[in-house]
Amino acid sequence: MSTNKAPLTSIIEDTQTLWGAGRKSMGCLFCRRIFLVPHSSTESVCPICGRGQLETQPVRMRSAMPELILPFQIRETQLRSIYDAFVTGVWIKPEDFTTEALLTRTRAIYWPLWLVDCDVTGHWQMEAGFDYQVESTKEAYINGQWTSRKQIEDRIRWEPRLGELTTHVNNIPVPALEEHQNREQMTGGYPYDQAEPFSLQQLDQTLLEVPDLPPTEAWPMAIPRINKEVGEICAQAAGAGHHRNFAVKADYHKLHWTQFLLPIYATHYLDDEGQAQVLIVNGVTGRIQGPRLASPKRGLRIAGILGAVAGGLFLLALIGFLLIALFPPAGLIAAFLVVLGVGMGIAAIALAVWPGNWNRKQAGPRIVSRGQANENH
């Protein structure tokens, strides 16, 4: 159980100026994400889902400023090469899937994570694992005779351990967004140890995504993460190199919540159906993730042109075969046209089929908004 109250949240009206920094709260009508944007911003489309319109609205959040920030290390000037490499990997692309379109729609965003510190007291038990080695011999038949070879085998001895604990844990990462796991899959890891104290000057025109999991709702997710860290502490205290089946009955005191901001670039392109396909770039490592789709419509269009050319070649070949009696070399020309027509036909089929096959293989993580989830149901 926790003996501490979580930081209080309050309603920030859309007419209020937050932190004296001239920022307003704007929410997406489609995915219901909320951002703090500069008052001077003309942002109209949600930078994360790429589908909904942003409108000013009140927001419930912690009124205090974030405490930590991980600054951008990838500059916007570096995005062109990142986008170029991503785009050129697709053979037949949607017409909107270009580096220039991605650059035009790029938005710099900080997204939130909670860090929790607390004191932990209670009782624990586990199976502690201790490494040891066993020496044995192995018989082998070599060059017509049996020989013995010594071998060392590593093993783990498991022993029950239990005890009382009084400890402190620091900076346990806890989701501040319902979609934290998916977002983490898209961005990959961050070097948390490079965090800096937050200051308003670091924001500039960058958007801030507001937590949709306040501390009171995030706390149930914090407990197993804290207990995992406590298990490592208990195993180390027991002198064990491994542990399993750890269980603890604990009380948690002096909770301290820190809001930590992580950098991303978000952009999108429109697929064949005009739907936004969102790409996320880790603002520190430059890792890019999102659907890299081909264009079935363009594939079919090109295939149709090649098919028409193949049909024309077959027609010319037929005429050539009919003219053999009058012009014998026409047979050779007709045969060549048939071969060329068959090649064009095969290429047309390949171009019609390839984009669909490519798209079915694009199974990596992607932004899925709550609005889209509701549509699917």
Image: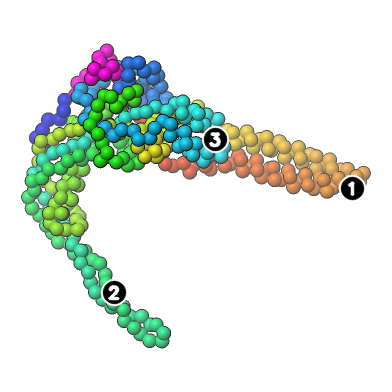
Residue at image location 33% in from the left, 39% down from the top = 184
Q: Which residues are magenta?
A: 9-25
Residue ranking furthest to the right: 326
Disc sitting over residue 151 in the figure: 2
Left or right of 160 in this view: 77: right
Residue ranking furthest to the top: 15
Left or right of 278 in this view: 253: left
* Image coords of residue 21 (percent x, y): 26, 18
Q: Magenta span has 218? A: no
Left or right of 167 in this view: 319: right
Q: Magenta span has 22? A: yes
Q: Tell me how far mark 3 sits from mark 2, CA to CA.
A: 57 Å
Residue at image location 65% in from the left, 40% down from the top = 348
Residue 127: name its quadrant: bottom left
Say if residue 124 shows up in the picture: yes
Identify the secondary structure beneath mark 2: strand
Residue placed most toward the observer, 279 or 223:
279
Amino acid at circle 1: Pro
Mark in front: 3 vs 2: 2
Q: Quadrant of the C terminus?
A: top left
Q: Which residue is mark 3?
A: 93
Q: Which residue is mark 1?
A: 328
Mark in front: 3 vs 1: 3
